[in-house]
Image: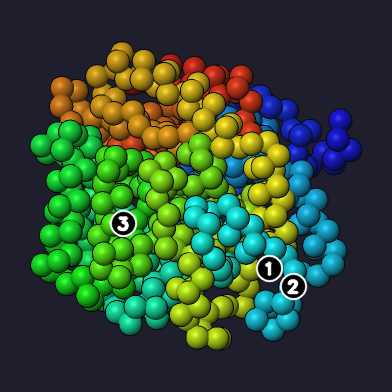
Amino acid sequence: MTGKTELSGGPSLPQERRVVTAVPGPVSQELMARKQASVANGIGTVLPVFARRAGGGVLEDVDGNSFIDFGSGIAVTSVGNSAEAVVRRATEQLNDFTHTCAMVVPYEPYVRVCEELAAVTPGDHAKKSALFNSGAEAVENAVKIARAHTGRQAVVVFDHGYHGRTNLTMALTSKNMPYKHSFGPFAPEVYRVPVAYPYRWLTGPENCAEEAAAQAIDQITKQIGPDNVAAIIIEPVLGEGGFIVPAKGFLPRIQQFARDNGIVFVADEIQSGFCRTGQWFACEDEGLVPDLITTAKGIAGGMPLAAVTGRADIMDAAHSGGLGGTYGGNPVACAAALGSIETMRELDLPAKARRIEEIMKPRLEKLAESSEIIGDVRGRGAMLAVELVKPGGKEPNPEATAALAKACHQQGLLVLTTGTYGNVVRFLPPLVIGEDLLNEGLDVLEEAVAGL
Ligand code: PLZ
């Protein structure tokens, strides 16, 4: 159909769920034995099958099983695992050159990605960007830039926040297991304050935004002193913390406080950005224009690329030569990003994400009505989740969550869990997934919930 080879994960890959062996099958089991012998234990596995091809809405394993993909490699392959424009542009770039080091000899695709970032991120002020390899690296650099700009040191983050696994970003990340345990000491001058988590706010969701903002601002004021704060960093939808959508009004209040006190407001859109929530960036939902925005994951269709984008005067606070890295803004990754952004525009992926919500959310809500262990359904666009609790209350139910994920995996549906309490099943389908597959995935989920 497309002239692509058999092994391509592109459009030639059958868009179907197919379970032909036990999960994991024999070939995956053999590979797993080799993994255990040669790969460090610290590198975990969610679904113990080995990938052979992936694309559209499916992932095919080495035993010939085909899974409906509700994970997108953790919100990365929004355009699919081998989108045509990504493959074409990255291949052309591979043929031209793989690397010069952007700090040694620059190249046009790097500049073009920064121009695109200025165009697609919120706000029409003058913007600049710097490119890196991973989300954690982008967050670290946002902190460096904010410190250079303000001449201050303290960084404020939130309960349930996740920002990465490097030393500084471990300090910014809230959850001990598995991210921090035994890996300290952590970077200093990091302070954590409450976030407006409606489902678990003690006085109920109604006053959550106001009370949480008041508490956060009070703690910053009393415990740190706003004059000492370089940056406030928040995920507009908290990803690893459990797909928590802060109660409406919370984010604008925090941003206003930052503005009033000369603090750089950083939106970490590494998971929520690039069309995932039905808008180009999740912070647009409440009309926020962050000073800096960190992106990665969805930006480049699976190639490693990350960015800090923001107000030109803040971005320029770091001295010449003060930012960089050998591979940051690799030309092949930049070409892939241009293909990814082109695909997002051409296919109107924000609209696709909204359509996914339209299909999924009512079915998830109906499922929650019929099940006493689904306590909450939340999220926006194609960043949706259910929070599982013990019957009759709100006590987190990580056991049922793990069992549910496993039951889905056995039936050929790849889902991921998340959450501070390990009790959230999250849904992050590629935005290009077919509606039939989406519905079939929901069928599998419903049966799995019924069978718990
Ligand atoms: N900020 C908001 O979601 C990465 C983590 C997976 P890197 N989230 C997935 C895992 O278990 O390691 C993430 C994020 C937000 C920063 C990061 C970090 O991005 O590209 O993984 O470094």
Q: Quadrant of residue 347?
A: top right
Q: Are marks 1 and 2 in contact (CB under 8 Å)?
A: yes
User: Relative to residue 402, is residue 293 depicted above or below?
Assistant: below
Q: Is mark 1 within 8 Å of ligand 1?
A: no
Query: Which SS class for mark 2?
Result: loop
Eye-nearest disc, 3 or 1: 3
Q: Nearer the viewer, residue 108 or 172?
A: 108
In the picture provided, is 276 more to the left or to the right than 178?
A: right
Q: Spatial distance from mark 3 to mark 1, Cα to Cα? A: 29 Å
Query: Which SS class for mark 1?
Result: helix
Residue 107: which numbered mark, if any? Answer: 2
Q: Position of residue 172 (x, y in %)?
A: 32, 64
In the picture provided, is 358 more to the left or to the right than 186?
A: right
User: Relative to residue 246, is residue 391 depicted above or below?
Assistant: above
Q: Spatial distance from mark 1 to mark 2, Cα to Cα? A: 7 Å
Q: Residue at x 75, y 69 (%)?
A: 108
Eye-nearest disc, 2 or 3: 3
Q: Position of residue 397 (x, y in %)?
A: 25, 33
Here the colouring is: rainbow
In the picture provided, is 239 more to the left or to the right than 354?
A: left
Q: Residue at x 38, y 43 (%)?
A: 286
Q: Which callout, 2 or 3, points at the residue further toward the start of the chain? A: 2
User: Which residue is tagged 1?
Assistant: 111
Q: Amino acid at mark 3?
A: Gln
Q: Position of residue 446 (x, y in %)?
A: 42, 18
Q: Amino acid at mark 1?
A: Val
Q: Are marks 3 and 1 in contact (CB under 8 Å)?
A: no
Residue 255: which numbered mark, if any? Answer: 3
Q: Amino acid at mark 2?
A: Tyr
Q: Can residue 425 be seen at all in this image of the molecule?
A: no
Q: Quadrant of residue 372?
A: top left
